[in-house]
Image (cartoon, helix red, strand yellow):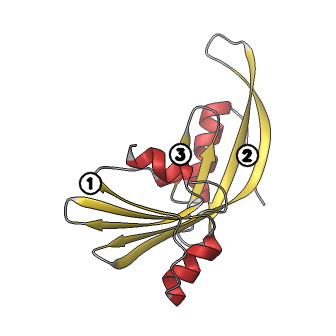
Amino acid sequence: MLLQERIQELNSGIINIVNDKIHLTGFMSSERLLDYYNEGYDCRFSIGIYPKENFDIAYIKDNGLFIILKDGQEVNRYEFKQIVNETVKYKDDNNKLRSKVYTIRYCKYSNKYNYKDSDKSILFDNKKELLAYFFKEYGTNLQLS
C-alpha cells in the first residue's frame, strides 16, 4: 500500500520523517493519538515504514489529527474541521450550466484552509488565497464567516 493511500484511510496519525524513511503510526481517533503522544499509552491501530516520498496532507479525513515529525521532533499538526459544505452553480468553458458540491475546511493548528470537491483537494495558506481561487474557478464569491 502506498503512503498516501494509508494516510487517507486513517482517522489520525503520526508521520515521522527519518532519513530516507517515513514511519507512520495510525490511530482510530485523535483522542487515541493524543493518549499515545502525550501520555504514552500504547493504543496504536497500525504502524508502517514507507520509503520517503511526497504526501499531500490535504486529503486527511475531517477531524482527523495528524502530527508531522522530523527525526522525532514535531514540526506541524493538522486537523481539518469542516466549515462549509455546499453546492456552487457555474458555467463551464462551453458556457454550459454546471454544479459542484464542495467542502471548505479549516485547520486551527496551521491556520490553513482546504478546498475539497470530488476531483481535488487544495490547501491555501490563508482565506484571501482561497477566496481568490474560488472566484477565479466559479465566477462567484465564497461566503465565509
Residue depicted at 55% across the width and 49% down the height? 9
70 sits left or right of 61 in the view: left
Q: What is the residue that sits farthest to the bottom in this orientation?
A: 39
Quadrant assignment, res 97: top right
Q: Residues within 10 Å of mark 2 (few under 14, many from 20)?
A: some
Q: Which tag is nearer the camera, tag 1 or tag 2?
A: 1
Q: For mark 3, give the secondary structure.
A: strand
Q: Are marks 1 and 2 in contact (CB under 8 Å)?
A: no
Quadrant assignment, res 27: bottom right
Quadrant assignment, res 138: top right
Q: Which tag is nearer the camera, tag 3 or tag 2?
A: 3
Which residue bears the numbered disc 2?
Answer: 142
Residue depicted at 62% across the width and 46% down the height? 115
Which residue bears the numbered disc 1?
Answer: 52
**Amino acid at the residue labelled 1:** Lys
Which residue bears the numbered disc 3?
Answer: 122
- The C terminus, quarter of image: bottom right
